[in-house]
Amino acid sequence: MMQSLPRTAAAVSVYALVALIAAGAAAAGGGEQPLSRIAIHRATVEPQPGAFVDASPALLGLEWKDREWVTVTYSNPKPSKDDWIGVFSPANFNDSICPSENQWVEAPLLCTAPIKFQFANYTSHNYEHTGKGSLRLQLINQREDFSFALFSGGLLNPKLIAHSKSVTFINPKAPVYPRLAQGKSWNEMTVTWTSGYSTNEATPFVRWGMQGQIQILSPAGTLTFSRNTMCGPPARTVGWRDPGFIHTSFLRDLWPNFMYSYQIGHQLFDGSIVWGHQYSFKAPPYPGEDSLQRVVIFGDMGKAEVDGSNEFNDFEPGSLNTTNQLIKDLKNIDMVFHIGDITYANGYLSQWDQFTAQVEPIASTVPYMVGSGNHERDWPGSGSFYGNLDSGGECGVPAQNMFYVPAKNREQFWYLMDYGMFRFCVANTELDWRPGTEQYKFIEHCLSSVDRQKQPWLIFLAHRVLGYSSATFYADEGTTEEPMGRESLQSLWQKYKVDIAMYGHVHGYERTCPVYENVCVAKGSDRYTGAFTATTHVVVGGGGASLADYTAARARWSHARDRDFGFAKLTAFNHTTLLFEYKKSRDGSVHDRFTVSRDYRDVLACGVDNCPSATLAS
């Protein structure tokens, strides 16, 4: 709750940097965080007589729901079209919670951004004449209480004129938003969730077992991170919000393809237990097992608000469509890969909770595997391959804590994963991948160590386009890829016969022919049979963020393009047939597809530049 404070001027040095981050992200196309538009450091407190804000109900979660709708009513005797409502959490957001270390010339009145906002006239179209309005906003359980503030002066010169009493969930600390990930072994599933319980208050665990069988208990480890682990603003300043505690439990020795049920919980020191909801998942298949296996892959989805808040510029208009389409088709999905640019939080930490809540129906049911992108990792002087400001000061910390990946070092964020007939090699384009680097050695090991007789389908995943793209922002730089991408890795793709390489970063869809050295080396466009010729490169960055443009001229290697939101789906029917589909997020319709039919002898056969010209036997 905001307390009345004397008016003072706030310095704008850090705000200028935050604005620079936002401008740079917008120039890059679709990476701007809406909360960055609010000049919170310029905020003044000027209570307006007759202005008020009220929110109801005041107590949420009475039926143990993790998300609830709140009705906010408000009035301003001097209304303006620029008035807006901010949702703050914790409810006390005055300068008493500002960090002692700051870069302000004078202490600001407000030092934390709202977790969401909406203009006062959004649904009350007569607000400018009557000064009265109301909004329906959705809140999720985020470990703290909430309050609502009415601002005049627009986003650039906000003046707080009224605020509400606090609203809270009945148990703000409750365990919420579980996300599954396959562990380092094929028969291991990890469950990660968030709560407000430290290990000094309660012991986290998972109760689980085969459906209908005796349940067992597995302990969970607990992680968190602090403001001083952030690399810069806004993550270290106005965007900071305590992440709570992140728990991960390892469910081991799973029987292949069996259904398991599970429930997250915390045992308090008085012996009572706080339970989360019940969920279920299907255990992974045995590596090499001949069965139907279906994997969805996309990048750059971000999050969006079902109540329409924060969406001043259609920042991520496709995000909810993609999420809802996957939920609708969940019975036909075994695993999901989200290959970078996960939330677009860009230093506003509250958005990570919002994202995990959005994908919870998916991630609690099938493994939700993530990769690192520029909006998770990049920051100057932090060791990232690119020295830009795209992470908003996060420098990878929230991503590597909020989601589990089976990497030897989660900071590096590269890993391999076997799933039935698939081998996935997940690279991290935000760290150096060139020959001689540790990541290059990992990539070669991942590609070379797979048994193609058992796992014929070899898939390379990365965020930035290391292969081929006709996006205009690459063309403007005179290229079709990230610098040194193809030049560094195409010899490995060709030598080890990578079937498909998939990327995000470009917000749209594009598929090449099987291409090597800019030349299509296979006939046809929708069915490839016989010996491997070259890797097919696919951009699937249309998960939700604002769409990118393509060049008017079309390269010969570009077989299909779509400037729309969508995702890819791989279906392995058996060891000889793989189906690729690109589906529209709006309705799930198939917009592009191709099949690969290949016997094991075809995998062994020589192709372009992947067998020696002569052998000792010859």
Image (spheres, helix red, strand yellow):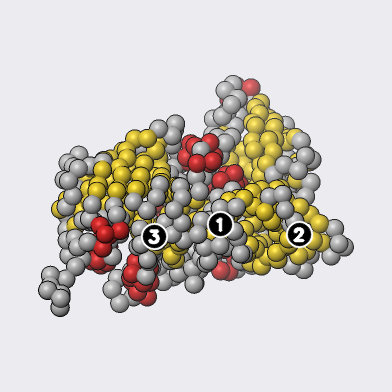
Cα distance in 3D space between marks 1 and 2: 28 Å
Mark before the other along the chain sequence, 1 or 2: 1
Q: Position of residue 364 (x, y in %)?
A: 60, 49
Q: Residues within 10 Å of mark 3 (few under 14, many from 20)?
A: many
Q: Secondary structure at mark 1?
A: loop
Q: Which residue is mark 3?
A: 455
Residue at x 66%, y 26% (from the top left corner): 132
In this rendering, the answer to whether 586 lies above or below 246 is above
Q: Residue at x 85, y 58 (%)?
A: 272
Report x, y in % for residue 217: 73, 62
- Quarter placement of the C terminus: bottom left
Q: Is residue 273 left or right of residue 397?
A: right
Q: Is residue 424 visible?
A: no
In front of the other: 580 or 454: 454
In the rendered structure, which disc, 3 or 1, sits on the residue that comes first in sequence?
A: 1
**Residue 387 in the image, given as x and y percentages of width and height:** 37, 65
Quarter location, residue 586: top left
Displayed quadrant of residue 562: top left
Residue at the (56%, 62%) spot, across then down? 187
Frontmost of labels 1 and 2 is 1
Name the one closer to the observer, 128 or 445. 445
Badge 3 marks a residue whose secondary structure is loop
- Within 10 angstroms of label 1, few (less than 14), some, or many (20 or more) residues? some
Q: Amino acid at mark 3?
A: Gln
Q: Nearer the viewer, residue 335 or 246?
A: 335
Name the residue beneath numbered marker 2.
266
Disc 3 and disc 2 in contact, CB within 8 angstroms: no
* Circle 2 SS class: strand
Farthest right residue in view: 270
Is residue 530 in sight in this rendering? yes
